[in-house]
């Protein structure tokens, strides 16, 4: 079960009672389908991850920090393949990480650890993964930690590496996250570490976010050691006990598939680290969003525990889609603690409840408290644009752009307002500025293609939409635009291919494009009588 929800983890039973996670509980992802048929995870998606990773490296370099060092936690199915169900076999050379690695140079791969060989070899001493969970064991986490620290000491030689002799190992019967879904839940022996050496940094702060996400700060370790910030998913939790002894100060960010650079700037660590599970190597959204640490974290960082608890309660109700209750609870929070971020979540709840006018008023209340919060300007811009008040919406999108110039979404929305007003030069300028900051955002390339197509610059438009498709080939709208432009250019074979791909991704729309597909096929036939 997923903590705090009624969601169940999809799983399959293998040999000897082993359980394997097959996808995400919300149905968004079926990674066993990727392993059976690698074509179901497009190389374009992995290429986009690589491009985003390079962008992160460049940002950290501009901040004067060492390279971003990453450890990828291998999928258990590739570490214990003999435990897969009868007749199920996956090609380890087609695993998500192996395919991602093809997008990087050898120099870039020197900053990424994928300790699958060590995890397989270490099985002979202790289990590196348990039979009823998809996370590694504490022993497996230590293997991942060592792979990460082997890279860290190249840049921070004073960082402390916990050696095997400094750990006492015991065995304990445990229930796994998949096993708990069975009745009765099976137990299995797992290795448990007791670390004898080192002065661990103590937890100074823990900010609990939604859905199990959190930020934690550990401080007070050996003052001779450097500091670090690590962005993790659930596999990284197992490495924290070791990392606390390797750095005098450790900031742990468990905030989904993002890196919050405003937190990195504020914390000023000596190095930034990243851990990702192999089945979570999906394209990261942009790190540059108006919904930043100020919105995600700061209102839960209150010195008043009652305020933090009340704010967390509002978010929980929003997450449960109880929008009217969330709006009422948020109003109570704002009455007692009138901070901009509280008004932001009140506006979000009201908007989700269908009360756009009240949501806009809540945004204005938020801006009265803090006019420098970009996310509030963006939300108010969306509300005004939906009402057809383009000039006012544009004013708020531009305010968001001024506050967060690298955020692509307000530029996209400003461009759409400008297009509606016939101001194509200004719309194009906004999109190109967004691409200068985020060249791997497929939706910006697609928007540029739409603008150029409207201007009659069809070849340039086609080049732009092909660039969008090279980054995200799963969006049917991009294929539809590609088909429209290729039709205009009389590139009939490409029109056929584009329309066929569009109907595959959007079968409900097949009838609407059938006349155009038939015409394109006839044109191809005339070319090849």
Image: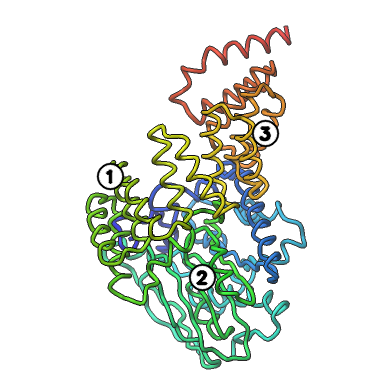
Q: CA distance from mark 2 to mark 3?
A: 38 Å
Instruction: Give me the disc on residue 236.
Output: 2
The residue identified by callout 3 is 464
- Say which element carries label 1: loop
Marks 2 and 3, the one that precedes in the sequence: 2
The local crowd at label 3, few if under 14, some if 14 to 19, many if 20 or more residues have their Cα within 10 Å, is many
Q: Nearer the viewer, residue 217 or 74?
A: 217
- Say which element carries label 3: helix
The local crowd at label 2, few if under 14, some if 14 to 19, many if 20 or more residues have their Cα within 10 Å, is many
Q: Nearer the viewer, residue 249 or 74?
A: 249
The local crowd at label 1, few if under 14, some if 14 to 19, many if 20 or more residues have their Cα within 10 Å, is some
Quadrant of the frame with the C terminus: top right
> Which x, y percent locates residue 75?
54, 60
Quadrant of the frame with the N terminus: bottom left
> Does residue 81 show up?
no
The residue identified by callout 1 is 353
Q: CA distance from mark 1 to mark 3?
A: 37 Å
Are dots 1 and 2 in contact, CB under 8 Å?
Answer: no
Q: Who's the residue at 45% across and 82% down the image?
A: 192
Q: Quadrant of residue 207?
A: bottom left
> Does residue 21 show up?
yes
């Amino acid at each position: 079960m997923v903590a705090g929800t009624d969601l169940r983890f999809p799983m399959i039973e293998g040999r000897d009672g082993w359980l394997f996670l097959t996808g995400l509980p919300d149905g968004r992802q079926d990674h066993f389908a990727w392993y059976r048929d690698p074509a179901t995870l497009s190389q374009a998606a992995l290429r986009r991850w690589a491009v985003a990773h390079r962008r992160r490296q460049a940002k950290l370099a501009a901040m004067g920090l060492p390279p971003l060092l990453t450890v990828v936690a291998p999928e258990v199915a590739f570490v214990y393949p003999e435990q897969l169900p009868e007749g199920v076999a996956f090609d380890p050379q087609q695993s998500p990480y192996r395919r991602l690695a093809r997008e990087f140079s050898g120099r870039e791969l020197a900053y990424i650890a994928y300790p699958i060989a060590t995890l397989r070899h270490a099985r002979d001493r202790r289990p590196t993964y348990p039979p009823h969970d998809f996370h590694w064991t504490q022993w497996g986490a230590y293997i991942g930690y060592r792979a990460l620290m082997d890279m860290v000491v190249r840049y921070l030689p004073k960082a402390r590496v916990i050696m095997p002799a400094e750990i006492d190992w015991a065995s304990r019967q445990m229930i796994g996250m998949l096993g708990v879904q069975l009745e009765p839940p099976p137990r299995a022996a797992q290795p448990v570490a007791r670390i004898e050496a080192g002065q661990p940094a103590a937890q100074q702060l823990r900010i609990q976010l939604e859905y199990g996400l959190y930020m934690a700060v550990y401080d007070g370790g050996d003052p001779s050691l450097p500091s670090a910030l690590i962005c993790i998913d659930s596999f990284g939790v197992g490495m924290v006990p070791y990392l606390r002894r390797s750095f005098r100060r450790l900031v742990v960010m468990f905030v989904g598939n993002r890196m919050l650079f405003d937190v990195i700037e504020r914390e000023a660590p000596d190095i930034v680290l990243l851990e990702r599970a192999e089945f979570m190597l999906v394209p990261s959204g942009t790190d540059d969003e108006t919904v930043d640490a100020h919105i995600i974290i700061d209102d839960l960082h209150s010195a008043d525990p009652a305020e933090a608890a009340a704010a967390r309660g509002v978010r929980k109700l929003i997450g449960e889609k109880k929008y009217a209750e969330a709006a009422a609870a948020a109003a109570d929070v704002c009455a007692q603690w009138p901070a901009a971020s509280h008004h932001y979540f009140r506006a979000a709840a009201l908007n989700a409840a269908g009360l756009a006018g009240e949501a806009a008023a809540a945004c204005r209340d938020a801006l009265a408290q803090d006019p420098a919060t970009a996310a509030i300007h963006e939300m108010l811009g969306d509300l005004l644009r939906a009402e057809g008040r383009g000039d006012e919406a544009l004013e708020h999108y531009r305010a968001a752009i001024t506050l967060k110039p690298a955020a692509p979404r307000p530029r996209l929305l400003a461009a759409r307002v400008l297009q509606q007003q016939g101001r194509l030069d200004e719309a194009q300028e906004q999109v190109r500025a967004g691409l200068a900051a985020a060249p791997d955002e497929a939706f910006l390339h697609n928007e540029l293609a739409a603008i150029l197509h409207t201007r009659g610059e069809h070849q340039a438009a086609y080049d732009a939409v092909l660039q969008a498709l090279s980054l995200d080939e799963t969006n049917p709208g991009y294929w539809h635009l590609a088909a429209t432009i290729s039709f205009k250019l009389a590139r009939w074979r490409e029109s056929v291919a584009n329309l066929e791909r569009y109907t595959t991704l959007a079968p409900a729309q097949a009838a609407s494009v059938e006349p155009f597909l038939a015409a394109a096929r006839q044109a191809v036939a005339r070319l090849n009588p």
